[in-house]
Every structure is written in C-alpha cells, then in structure tokens.
Amino acid sequence: MKKYLLFLGLISCLQAYTQKMQGLALTPPMGWNSWNTFATNINEQLVKDIADIMVSSGMKDAGYEYLVLDDGWMAMERDKDGNLVADPKKFPHGIKAVADYVHAKGLKFGLYNCAGTKTCAGYPGTRGYEYQDARYYAAHGVDYLKFDWCNTEGINAKEAYTTMSKALAATGRPIVFSLCEWGQNKPWEWASNVGHLWRTTGDISNVFAGTKNMGTWQALGVLKIIDLQKGLRAYAGPGHWNDPDMLEVGNGLTDAENRAHFSMWCMLAAPLMAGNDLRKMTEATKNVLTNKNVIAVDQDPLGIEGFAYTEKDSVETWLKPLQNGDWAVCFLNRSNKPVKFSMDWKQHPIVDTLSKATLNAVTNIYNIKNLWTNTTEGNTNEPYSNTVGGHDVIMLRLQKSN
C-alpha cells in the first residue's frame, strides 16, 4: 500500500511539473551565462556584480531574466553522501546564498551540470545521480539548468536527458531545462517534451565568418551557426526552442557584427543568453543587447522561427511572421563590403508554408519601421532600397496600416 501511495504521489508530482513546464519559456529564455567570457573562473563576487549590472544597465528591464553559472562552480569531489558541493574558495557562503542574492534583485538563478560522468571541465557529472542532483538544485533555489554532453561514452542521449527531466519533475520546482547536447542526436526530433530548449550545433566562437581553431576541435562562427539552423524551424515554438548557442555580442566582434549576430538570433526566435563581461561593456554593446524593438521580434508571442527567403549579391533576406499580421524582415550582408539591395514588396504575396501567414502588399499597406534606427521608412507601396554595410544587417518591422 505504501509503495502504491508513493507511486501515486510521484505521478501527481509529474503531472504538476508538466503543467509548470508548459508554462515556462513560452518565449525564448533571456539571460546571462558565465562561460563565454569567464570559463571556470567564476566566484561569488562575480555573481553579485553581474546581478547588480543586469539591473542597473537596463538589461533586466529589457527582458533578461536568468543569471546562469556554467561549468566550474563545483568542488572536484562530491561529499561523503554523494551530494554536489560548491567550491568553498569560489563560493564561501555556498550556492544558496548567491541564488538568494540573485532572487533579491528580481532575477532568476541557473546552474550547470553534465549528463556524463564528469563535466567538460572535469568536475562531478550527473550520471547515476540524477534525482539526487535535482533535489540539490531545487533546495538551492535553482530556476534554470544547463545540462551538457561531455564524458558520455556509451550513454544514450534521449534516455539521459529524459531521466534528468523526470528527476527535475520529481522536485516539483519549475526549472527551465536547457539541453546542451550539441545537436549530435537531433534533439529537435524528440526533446520538446523533455526540455525547454536544445542546442542545435557545437559551440559558438567570437568570429563572424568561418571557424575558430580550439586545438582538437573547431568552434563555429556566427554565419556557420546560422546556416545550420535551416530546416529546423518546424520544431520550435512556445515552450520548446532551437538553441543556436549563447551570444558573443561584446566579445570582440565589430559593432556591425554584434548587431547582425543579435538580429539573426532574434529572427531565429533563439534564446538570448548574453555571454560578455557586463561590467565592462561599451555603450554600443549595451545598446545592441537592450534594443527593445529587436528583442520584441525574438519575444513575439506567436513563437514562429524566421526563415531565409532569398539571397542575392551576398545579401540574404530573412522573414519572420509576428502577431497581428506584422512581419520582421532582416537583410543580412554575409560579405565584408557594403552592398546595395532592393525589395519589391508587391512583386507577389509571400506565404510562410509553416505558419500559413501571408505578407500581401498587393492588398495591404504595411508601414516600414527600421528597428535599429527607430525610424519610419515609408510603406510597402514603393519598393524598398538601401545599402547594408559589410557583416551588418538592416532589420525592419512591417506593420499593417489598414
């Protein structure tokens, strides 16, 4: 009888978590992650500094919600009972104290672990400890878990991530579950009921075109990652997102490349996880990360991922249906030289075969708003012509006027 009641309790808990899970990440998660700039060099003071600047810089007001500590927060060994332990030198007051600090700022707190026996940096992994670790996260106020894929030889990805998902469910705490499996096992085909977002590629790097040599592997540039998103948009939507990796805005790209990178992540309805040192960011970087016009495209409630429509003279035209019949249009210049382009809105209606949304400038007039200059640039009664800089974008919002 006791086992039966325990079973019923677990089922009830899973059902409750499922309801909570469905209410999480209805738009792509936004926040900050420590890895791209700090790797494992993280500590308690850094968390506090980042939380403070997320508020004071306007990032929180722009929608950035999660402060996520990546690999390197743990001690090298579990305690005698098998529990995870925060590194006592980096976090002398423990993880709960920093989570409480983040929460007091009106933000949410995230941690990292790995599906394998060890994390990518060699700290204790979760394999065999899924339910114990999930209880640790819930008890320490964790709101977001990034779950990596190192040291997983012989492990089935779907099984491993499903087990962790069920472990989180058993805690009863609503935790956004980020699958960082690098797209190796096509998580978009099976993870929509397992987690809230899944990586579609290997790691990003702070280069715009090409790759970056990391010794034994190649980190991907922005354009490479964009190309790998094509064909995946059918799998994304409210509560379940394709994740092309964290942002490199402010990490050595030019201002134009920062703008293009950010714009395309928003066109892709991607999670927006900043990865720069917020304490040292330039005004130009902050203006990119906090542009509410562009963020609104990413956070559009319809949750429809954009698509590549045409390419001519190195300029790709991307389209994204938005609520109320609006459309986002992004002209991406893949070359490093300025290119003139034009778009005849009335040439023929554009139909998104996935969402069935239609951009019909023959029967409708759309006002054109430039999302980076925050200016109105006429309407769709006339063809649109402009020059887009090298490795830059022009991003528009078409709004019905009738």
Image (cartoon, helix red, strand yellow):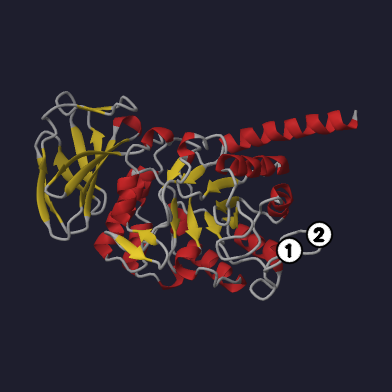
> Which of the 4 image quadrants contains residue 268?
top left
Residue 258 picture location, percent across and down = 30, 60
Q: Residue furthest front?
A: 154
Q: Which residue is mark 2?
A: 81
Q: Indicate left or right for 301 with 96 as reference.
A: left
Label 2, secondary structure: give it.
loop
One can see residue 294 in this view: no
Q: Residue at x 63, y 34 (%)?
A: 18
Seen at 55% across and 56% down, the residue is 150
Kindly indicate the quadrant of the structure image that contains residue 302: top left
| Image position of 312 with respect to 337: above or below | above
Residue 14 screen position, x and y as percent: 69, 34
Residue, far bottom: 89
What kind of element bears circle 1? loop
Amino acid, disc 2:
Asp
- Residue depicted at x 13% and y 60%: 337
Q: What residue occupies the far right of the structure in this picture?
A: 1
Quarter of the picture containing the C terminus is: top left
Q: Which amino acid, by three-letter code, is at mark 1?
A: Arg
Report whether 207 appears left or right of 104: left
**What distance separates the C-alpha of mark 2 from that of mark 1?**
8 Å
CB under 8 Å between callouts 2 and 1?
A: yes
The location of residue 20, given as percent across then percent down, is: 62, 37
**x, y percent for residue 33:** 50, 60
Disc 1: which residue: 78
Say left or right for 402 vs 105.
left
Seen in the picture, residue 88 relative to 131 is either above or below; the reply is: below
